[in-house]
Image (cartoon, helix red, strand yellow):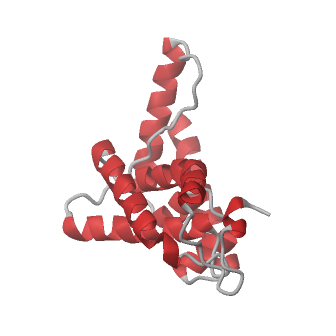
Amino acid sequence: MSGLQERQDTRTGKASANSAEVFSQLYEENFPKVYRYICYQVTDTDAAEDLTSEVWEKALNKFESYDSRRAAFSTWVLTIARNTVTDFFRENRKQQNMQIQTIRSIQPDPPPDEAVVKDEEIRQLKTYIAGLSRQEQEIISFKFGGELTNREIAKNLGLSESNVAVIIYRAVRKLREQFLGAEI
C-alpha cells in the first residue's frame, strides 16, 4: 500500500488532513513531469518556472480535495497544469509559440561538435512542433513532456484512447518526415 493510500479515508478516497509528507513525496515524483509538460507549452523558461510554481501552489491548496478513485495523482496535477497554461495563454495571447526545453539528466557535457548538432536538432524540432495543430501540440506535450499514457490523455481531453493514439502517430510521422526532408 502506498503512503497516499495509507493516509486516505477509506470511505472517500480523499487525502487525510495530516498528509504533508505524502504531498511532498508526490511532488518529488511528479515535479519533472509537470515542468516538462509546461516547457513543451510555453516559450519563456522564466514563465515556465513561474507556471510550474503556480501549479504546485494550486495543487497544495486543493490537495485535500484530491480523490484517488477519480484519477491518478499525476493525471490530477497535470490537469491543473493544463488549466494553468490555458489561463496563461489567455492572459498573454501574444505568446503562442511552442517550445521544447531539453531537460538533461546529470551527465558530463558532450563534446562541442555533438552539442552543436544536438542544439540544431532541438531548434528544428521546436520549429516543426510549432507547425503542428494546437491539439497535436497539446497531446505531444502530455505524451512526451508529462509522460501520460494515451488513456490518461484521452480522459484529460475528452477524446477516445484510439483517437489519441492516431493523433500521436500522425504527429510523430509528420515530425519524422520533416526531419528526413531536412536531411536531404
Q: Quadrant of the N terminus?
A: bottom right
Q: Nearer the viewer, residue 52 or 180?
A: 52
Is residue 6 toward the left or the right of residue 94 in the image?
Answer: right
Please state the horizontal and vertical placement of residue 84, each as a whole percent of the image.
Answer: 36, 67
Q: Nearer the viewer, residue 109 or 114?
A: 109
For the point 44% across and 53% down, the residue is 40
Residue 79 percent coordinates (x, y): 49, 71
Along the viewing direction, whichever of 126 and 91 lies nearer the viewer: 91
The residue that appears at 36% across and 64% down in the rendered structure is 85
Image mark count: 0
In the displayed structure image, the side of residue 179 where residue 119 appears, left or right: left
Whether residue 177 is visible here, answered yes or no, is: no
Horizontal side of 89 relative to 39 (left or right) equals: left
Check the image and report above or below for 39 versus 143. Answer: above
Q: Nearer the viewer, residue 137 or 26?
A: 26
Point 31% across, 51% down: residue: 50
Q: Position of residue 91 (x, y in %)?
A: 20, 67
Q: Residue furthest right?
A: 1
Spot occupied by residue 74 in the image (x, y as percentages of width and height): 59, 63
Q: Is residue 100 visible?
A: yes
| Residue at x 71%, y 68% (from the top left corner) | 5
Q: Is residue 7 above or below residue 70?
A: above
